[in-house]
Amino acid sequence: NTHQSSKTAKLAELDKKHFLHPASNPKAVVDNGPAVIFAEGKGVTVTSTDGIEYIDGMSMLWNVNLGHGNQELAEAGNQQLSTLACTSQFKAFSNEPAILLAEKLASLAPGDLNSVFYTSGGSESNDTAIKLARFYWELKGKPAKRKFIALNNAYHGVTVAAQTATGLSAYHHFSGSNIEGVVRATAYLLDSEKGDKNAPNYESSIRATIEREGADTIAGIIIEPVQGAGGVNIPPDGYLQAVRQLCDEFNILFLADEVICGFGRTGKMFGVNNWDVVPDMMSIAKGLTSGYGQLGGVMLNDEIKQTISSFDAVVPHGFTYSGHPTACAIALKNLEIIERDQIIGNVKSMELELKKGLKYLEEKHSIVTNCRAIGLLAAFELYEDPASGKLFDPTVFPANAVVDACFERQLILRALGAHNQIIAIAPPLIINKEEINKMIQIIDEAI
Ligand code: PLP
């Protein structure tokens, strides 16, 4: 209606003038205004200020896992906000939700990852993990162990260390502010990591990188159990186990970046659970609060926690919001709902529906290929000729065309990959069969 559209127009003007958007094209925003202004959400849908309802096929940024408008999460936040919204955790101050959440996380995490250092999000978690790993090795009398190995196509965030570890060139090089000491290896060279020196691309493997750099200079390896923003890349079975063995062989810390995978996204509580691997450190964020609070953390195994706990002075690292009581209260409720409502069971059955839908798309459209899903983390790819991997001529079939056509049909998806040829699907974990089928129907029409 006219009231809605004049409100939207006013907001769009203000947005153009004053809002520099994250991970967006600033010129396009100034020229055209925001793509959409969201006003409310319920379940798997969000509605714009114009009253258009979209299916949120990406859980926004792979994080709104319990969906929008969850009143229990709102109430948990509201209760804590009106009791004690914010405290300091510096100098050993503490608060009840942060303590109870730390205990809950220890009970859910694999192996002896029994402690958490809180942050406000995924990037801060990865920077924190890198710093704590270096600190750990200093305390162990091995200060030369400082480097981190990170993989091609990894996405670890945008703070300086996390950005350096990110293996997507645009992010990796942005503003030239990389730290020293991140070395890169190629993802998923399974045979090489197992020790086969004749395997193809051996030189780009983690194993060869360790041999070249010297294990005594390497603090850790950072890996997403399933790469997200790099294209939804699922490792072959045995890969993460092989990396775990490498870490043991060379005395290197295994840092799992569970920022997307954690809390049910892949059909297990954590991504590493799919391969029964226990990392030494684990970065968490996103699904920890389903996006209702800004919270992340680094989980540490007992050895690292005990070593750091032997240090008898103030550790000069921590964020104002490390252990924010409101964010922690929301996370506690979020984890309670995930268990109570058997959300991970739903993920497993909806994974089957989604795979059926993707198979249908692949069989029907000759340009669709490489469909994959683990839990509700899925993707397919588009090529003019899938057999040869020939990409579309962007003047004929523009990058983003299918994502744009889905958006016109009220489904939010995201294009990934160097040529936007990978279409990611990661809906809220509460999605049902009808909603999955609706998504597939829209993608079908859009293609
Ligand atoms: N690590 C992974 C695997 C991510 O996908 C992301 C965000 O998408 C991050 C880290 C960074 O998290 P944040 O944006 O909360 O800083």
Image (cartoon, helix red, strand yellow):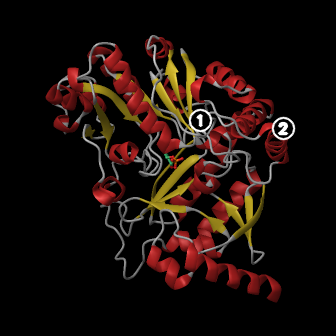
Can residue 234 be seen here? The reply is yes
Q: Is mark 2 within 8 Å of ligand 1?
A: no
Can residue 224 be seen here? The reply is no
Q: Amino acid at mark 2?
A: Thr
Q: Is mark 1 within 8 Å of ligand 1?
A: no
Splitting the image into 4 quarters, where does residue 373 fall? top right
**As drawn, which residue projects farthest toward the bottom?**
2
**Circle 1 residue:** 322
Secondary structure of the residue carrying tag 1 is: loop
Instruction: Check the image and report above or below for 340 versus 312.
Output: below
Q: Residue at x 38, y 45 (%)?
A: 154
Number of numbered markers: 2
Task: Give the image location of residue 375, x and y in percent.
Answer: 60, 40
Q: Residue at x 64, y 73 (%)?
A: 36
Residue 83 numbered mark, or none: 2
Task: Give the image location of residue 277, x and y in percent.
Answer: 47, 22
Residue sitting nearer the eye, 328 or 388: 328
Secondary structure of the residue carrying tag 2 is: helix
Instruction: Check the image and report above or below for 333 versus 44.
Output: above
Q: Quadrant of the C terminus?
A: bottom right
Q: Amino acid at mark 1?
A: Ser
State left or right for residue 382 relative to residue 390. right
Task: Give the image location of residue 162, x and y in percent.
Answer: 40, 44
Splitting the image into 4 quarters, where does residue 418 fall? bottom left
Give the mark, 1 or 2, whose residue is nearer the N terminus.
2
Q: Dot 1: few (<14), some (14–19), or many (≥20) neighbours within 10 Å?
A: many
Instruction: Check the image and report above or below for 342 versus 433.
Output: above
